[in-house]
Image (cartoon, grey):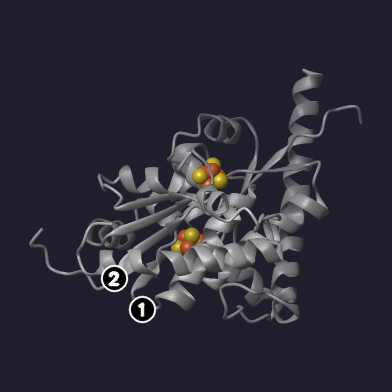
């Protein structure tokens, strides 16, 4: 109580060439816009390399959660490379497998058929944010008590 | 310039997660590779360049490249340039709107109708550029 809520950075891969990249993008936007707008902030992954000092600095000072569309794990690797280890690195194929939901087959024009995939990924991100926020608050109150 | 004609043209879109213009870059790129020039225009996940993926790096260095960026930060163009590539056709998506003021894009997760239409129009207009680049010509 009384402690400010730490912003958690969400780093989606948003991969353009795979349907999982679209799932990633839509799920992250759902979290950022609707589910946890006051607790999360989006980090543009390509800005890490295009000179985004602000992005790099944010990710070194705040917990980040990366969301990747495939085993290449671009978001997790880039975040670690340019900024710091993410508190959680989510992988969409793993999440969908866990829920028995098939990977969407198209790159865009998502509708009802793809809704479940986007929803379970968004829910998993919410769980990761809650865990990261709880951890941050515990750490802050421990430091405050010193 | 006496080079072997390229069969494919690499397309890199920034997909900016927080901006309508980034969403427009993504949609235009998808229009290009799925509808306008499938098999010739080849989409590469931009983040692969950020992690210096060997295959993506090679594709960018070996093919003519079109970049589609959502703002002057030009993440797609700069990611290619960071590999030592001089991008053949760098674009910023606001220029599509400047040319078609009747189509004002809105939305990020989902572009509005005007935004989707603008992506279609812009991609169609880029067809000739893709053809020239694929034939080994300058734009
Ligand atoms: S993790 Fe996979 S889907 Fe995402 S950007 Fe990288 S290659 Fe593309
Ligand atoms: S070019 Fe602009 S909109 Fe696109 S990813 Fe970079 S900062 Fe975001």
A73 sits to left or right of B19: left
Q: Quadrant of the N terminus of chain B?
A: bottom left
Residue B45 in the image: x percent, y percent? Answer: 44, 61
Q: Where is mark 1, residue-wise?
A: B39
B54 sits to left or right of A130: left
Instruction: Tell me which corner region of the image, top left, top right, bottom left or bottom right, holds residue A121.
Output: bottom right
Q: Are marks 1 and 2 on the same chain?
A: yes
Residue B114 in the image: x percent, y percent? Answer: 67, 63
A47 sits to left or right of A90: left
State the separation of the CA atoms marked 1 and 2: 7 Å
The front one of A138 and A53 is A53
Q: Where is mark 2, residue-wise?
A: B8
Q: Residue at x 43, y 50 (%)?
A: B91
Contact between marks 1 and 2 (CB within 8 A): the answer is yes
Q: Quadrant of the C terminus of chain B?
A: bottom left
Check disc 2 and report its element: helix, strand or loop. loop
Mark carried by residue A144: none
Check disc 1 and report its element: helix, strand or loop. loop
Residue extending furthest toward the right: A1
Quick check: is the Cβ at mark 1 less than 8 Å away from ligand 1? no
Residue extending furthest toward the top: A146
Q: How many numbered marks, from 0 up?
A: 2
Counting other residues with Cα less than 10 Å from the Cα at mark 1, is it few (<14), some (14-19), or many (20 or more)?
A: few
A79 sits to left or right of B61: right
Residue A79 in view (yes/no)? no
- Nearer-N-terminus badge (1/2): 2
Q: Residue at x 31, y 66 (%)?
A: B9
On what subunit does the disc labeled 2 rest?
B
Residue B29 in the image: x percent, y percent? Answer: 48, 64
Q: Residue at x 68, y 80 (%)?
A: A101
The front one of B36 and A51 is B36
On what subunit does the disc labeled 1 rest?
B
């Amino acid at each position: 109580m009384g402690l400010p809520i730490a912003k958690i950075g969400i780093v989606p891969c948003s991969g353009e060439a795979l349907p999982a990249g679209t799932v990633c993008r839509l799920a992250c936007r759902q979290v950022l816009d609707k589910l946890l707008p006051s607790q999360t902030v989006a980090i543009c992954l390509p800005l890490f390399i295009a000179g985004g000092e602000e992005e790099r600095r944010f990710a070194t000072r705040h917990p980040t959660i990366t969301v990747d569309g495939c085993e290449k794990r671009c978001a997790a690797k880039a975040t670690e490379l340019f900024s710091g280890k993410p508190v959680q690195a989510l992988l969409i194929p793993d999440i969908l497998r866990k829920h028995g939901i098939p990977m969407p087959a198209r790159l865009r024009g998502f509708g009802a058929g793809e809704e479940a995939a986007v929803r379970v990924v968004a829910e998993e991100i919410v769980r990761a944010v809650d865990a990261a926020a709880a951890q941050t608050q515990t750490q802050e109150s421990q430091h405050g008590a010193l | 310039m006496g080079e072997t004609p390229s069969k494919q043209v690499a397309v890199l879109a920034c997909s900016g997660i927080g901006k309508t213009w980034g969403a427009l870059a993504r949609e235009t790129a998808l229009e290009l590779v799925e509808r306008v020039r499938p098999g010739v225009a080849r989409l590469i996940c931009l983040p692969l360049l950020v992690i210096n993926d060997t295959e993506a790096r090679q594709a960018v260095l070996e093919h003519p490249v079109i970049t589609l960026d959502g703002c002057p930060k030009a993440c797609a163009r700069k990611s290619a340039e960071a590999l030592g590539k001089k991008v053949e056709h760098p674009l910023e998506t606001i220029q599509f709107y400047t040319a078609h003021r009747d189509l004002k894009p809105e939305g990020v997760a989902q572009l509005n109708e005007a935004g989707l239409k603008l992506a279609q129009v812009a991609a169609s207009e880029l067809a000739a550029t893709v053809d020239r680049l694929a034939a080994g010509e300058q734009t």
